[in-house]
Image: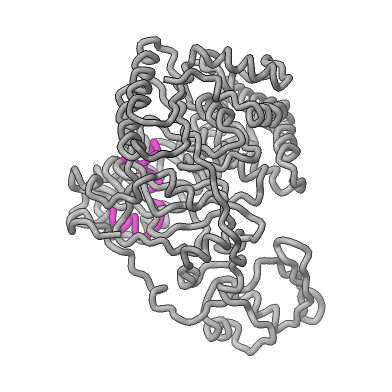
């Protein structure tokens, strides 16, 4: 990729790892249990492999928890050991044949933002005209306002005249009747909780986006899916120095670059002519096939533990690929700018410091090399929906986070690719992230369901996605029946971990940055104070607990009927019944 003009260029992040040219070694992922006479039992994290180790071998395993040259490892344990650790290349999965991927169903979610919708559709039309693709586009409108519905349909019809692909429209007023047909075909009683997940008229007073997400998953069942919110825009763009070789990292943490020039984001280099084809290079593939095709920066594993590659198993497949963002971040608080990687913090605090950088409205946020990661929390640009995928809850706003955690929970071999590209994000309404970040951290109801899912994950052993989802649902149901005291304990444990994590991380950063700009230090102290105060709030209102119970009951019910609903949609393709614009 070509560099952009100097004033908008994102400097390449230099690191000591660039000087590492010799093979790196690390202990295999597993557990050591001490035995008699200094010997130990080592058991693999995955599978049934186990070995009895001598004292020297156990010492080397303990020393080799991060990738490093052989001499460095031996120096750590200060003795020669008979057990040799594998190098990074031997840990990577063998190459596999690349698998073709069908064109996706592109689902565009919109609610009361017709001008933003039109802007997104026009940016798609710019590369879709004459492409000859077999894609299908579905505009899913969540608004209950007739004028907004008409404006959204008009934008969809205008887009349909510009492209050769079919463009369909699902209005909020039509969702109920389509749902009834699907429920009847699947043999499911609609009164079991379907309406709250799929009918905008039954969602309650706030449009969270969950109903449009769930419709996107059902209407593309058995296919591949791209989910787009109406406030994003193409083309994809990248930082200078971005490359195709994979970084060996399991981290979701991006780098953020803060621009001070108003038009800087638009001068970042574009990535590929067709974003869906770009994402399709990754989705559905085995990790070994991708690493063989694009290459690996083995030195990127230096000092990292084996967990940075232990998820790259031969039987795993990439379930989804996601991007970073440019212009505006996707989150409603800027607190995590201050607790992330050093490159982000250095660029935020660079002279001359500007506090408005923390609004996150003029940034590039992403990675420079693709990463294959074991989980994701970001709306995927492309999702493999050819096997059972879950729902998301409509009682919270973090619809993507809950969906992706459930995806991993029911499909433990699912992997995700963080692509070295960013999608434009231009929210219609001001997010006021600085003001929000000096309040206690956002505790979304769907994120509590994520915490509940993580609680039960170690107990799941079945390879059947439906069974796994059913067991998770039964755990939700059991917790929904708990006393107020027991439920409060669970909610407070989740909130305490969030607040305490921010306080601890930001306090450490403050201590490490005594020369940081006074305005930023004062801001950071306000963030710490707000989250520390939240730790002292030990009483939860009955109304709040009832919201939590409603979310648990909804998710419990959906976990039971969703697999049949998804399979019915995969077999009958109800998307074909929607009107064409």
* Position in image of residue 261 (x %, y %): 18, 47
Nearest the viewer among 176 and 127 is 127
- Left or right, 426 with respect to 563, comes to left
- Residue 395 appears anywhere in the view: no
Q: Is residue 331 magenta?
A: yes
Q: Is residue 548 above or below residue 50?
A: above
Which image quadrant: the C terminus?
top left
Furthest toward the top, the residue is: 146
Which image quadrant: the N terminus?
bottom left
* Position in image of residue 463 (x %, y %): 74, 47
- Left or right, 539 with respect to 276, comes to right
What residue lies at 34% left-to-right and 26% top-to-bottom?
159
What residue lies at 26% left-to-right and 60% top-to-bottom?
2
Nearest the viewer among 554 and 448 is 554
Nearest the viewer among 244 and 469 is 244
Q: Is residue 233 above or below residue 557?
A: below
Q: Is residue 126 magenta?
A: no
* Position in image of residue 479 (x %, y %): 70, 31
* Position in image of residue 136 (x %, y %): 47, 31
- Left or right, 390 with respect to 459, comes to left
Q: Which residues are magenta?
A: 328-348
The answer to which quarter of the image holds residue 512 is: bottom left
The answer to which quarter of the image holds residue 191 is: top right
What residue lies at 53% left-to-right and 42% top-to-bottom?
102
Q: How is the image coloured?
A: one colour
What residue lies at 59% left-to-right and 42% top-to-bottom?
405
Q: Is residue 275 above or below residue 301?
A: above
């Amino acid at each position: 990729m070509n560099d952009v003009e100097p004033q908008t260029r994102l400097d390449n992040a230099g690191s000591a790892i660039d000087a590492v040219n010799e093979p790196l070694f690390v202990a295999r992922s597993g557990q050591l249990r001490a035995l008699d006479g200094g010997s130990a039992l080592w058991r693999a994290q995955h599978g049934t492999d186990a070995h009895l180790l001598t004292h020297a071998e156990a010492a080397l395993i303990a020393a080799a928890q991060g990738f490093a040259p052989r001499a460095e490892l031996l120096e750590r344990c200060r003795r020669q050991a008979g057990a040799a650790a594998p190098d990074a290349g031997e840990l990577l999965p063998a190459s596999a044949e690349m698998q073709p991927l069908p064109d996706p169903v592109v689902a565009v979610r919109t609610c009361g933002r017709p001008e933003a919708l039109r802007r997104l559709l026009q940016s798609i039309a710019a590369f879709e005209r004459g492409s000859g693709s077999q894609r299908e586009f579905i505009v899913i409108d969540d608004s209950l306002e007739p004028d907004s519905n008409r404006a959204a349909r008009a934008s969809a019809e205008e887009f349909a005249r510009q492209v050769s692909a079919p463009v369909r429209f699902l209005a909020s007023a039509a969702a109920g009747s389509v749902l009834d047909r699907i429920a009847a075909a699947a043999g499911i009683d609609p009164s079991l909780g379907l309406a709250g997940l799929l009918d905008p008229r039954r969602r309650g007073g706030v449009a969270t986006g969950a109903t449009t997400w769930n419709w996107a998953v059902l209407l593309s069942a058995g296919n591949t899916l791209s989910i787009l919110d109406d406030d994003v825009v193409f083309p994809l763009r990248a930082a200078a120095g971005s490359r195709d070789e994979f970084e060996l990292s399991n981290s979701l943490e991006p780098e953020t670059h803060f621009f001070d020039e108003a038009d800087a984001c638009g001068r970042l280099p574009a990535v590929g002519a067709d974003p869906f084809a770009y994402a399709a290079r990754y989705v559905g593939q085995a990790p070994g096939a991708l690493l063989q095709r694009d290459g690996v920066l083995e030195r990127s594993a230096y000092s990292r533990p084996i967990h940075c590659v232990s998820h790259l198993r031969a039987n795993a497949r990439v379930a989804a690929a996601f991007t970073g963002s440019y212009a505006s971040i996707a989150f409603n608080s800027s607190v995590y700018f201050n607790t992330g990687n050093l490159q982000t913090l250095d660029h935020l605090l660079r002279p001359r410091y500007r506090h408005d950088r923390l609004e996150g409205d003029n940034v590039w946020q992403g990675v420079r090399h693709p990463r294959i990661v074991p989980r994701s929390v970001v709306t995927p640009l492309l999702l493999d929906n050819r096997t059972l995928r879950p729902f998301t809850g409509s009682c919270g706003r973090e619809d993507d986070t809950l969906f992706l955690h459930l995806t991993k929970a029911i499909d433990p071999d699912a992997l995700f690719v963080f692509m070295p590209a960013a999608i434009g994000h231009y929210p219609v309404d001001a997010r006021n992230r600085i003001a929000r970040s000096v309040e206690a951290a956002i505790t979304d109801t769907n994120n509590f369901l994520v915490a509940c899912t993580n609680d039960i994950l170690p107990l799941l052993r079945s390879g059947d996605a439906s069974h796994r989802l059913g067991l998770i649902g039964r755990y939700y149901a059991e917790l929904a029946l708990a006393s107020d005291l027991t439920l409060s304990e669970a909610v407070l444990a989740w909130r305490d971990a969030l607040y305490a994590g921010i306080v601890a991380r930001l306090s450490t950063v403050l201590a490490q940055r005594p020369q940081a700009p006074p305005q930023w230090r004062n801001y950071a102290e306000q963030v710490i104070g707000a989250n520390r105060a939240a730790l002292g709030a030990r009483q939860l209102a009955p109304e709040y607990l009832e919201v939590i119970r409603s979310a648990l009951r909804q998710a419990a019910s959906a976990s039971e009927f969703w697999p049949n609903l998804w399979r019915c949609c995969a077999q009958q393709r109800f998307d074909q019944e929607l009107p064409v614009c």
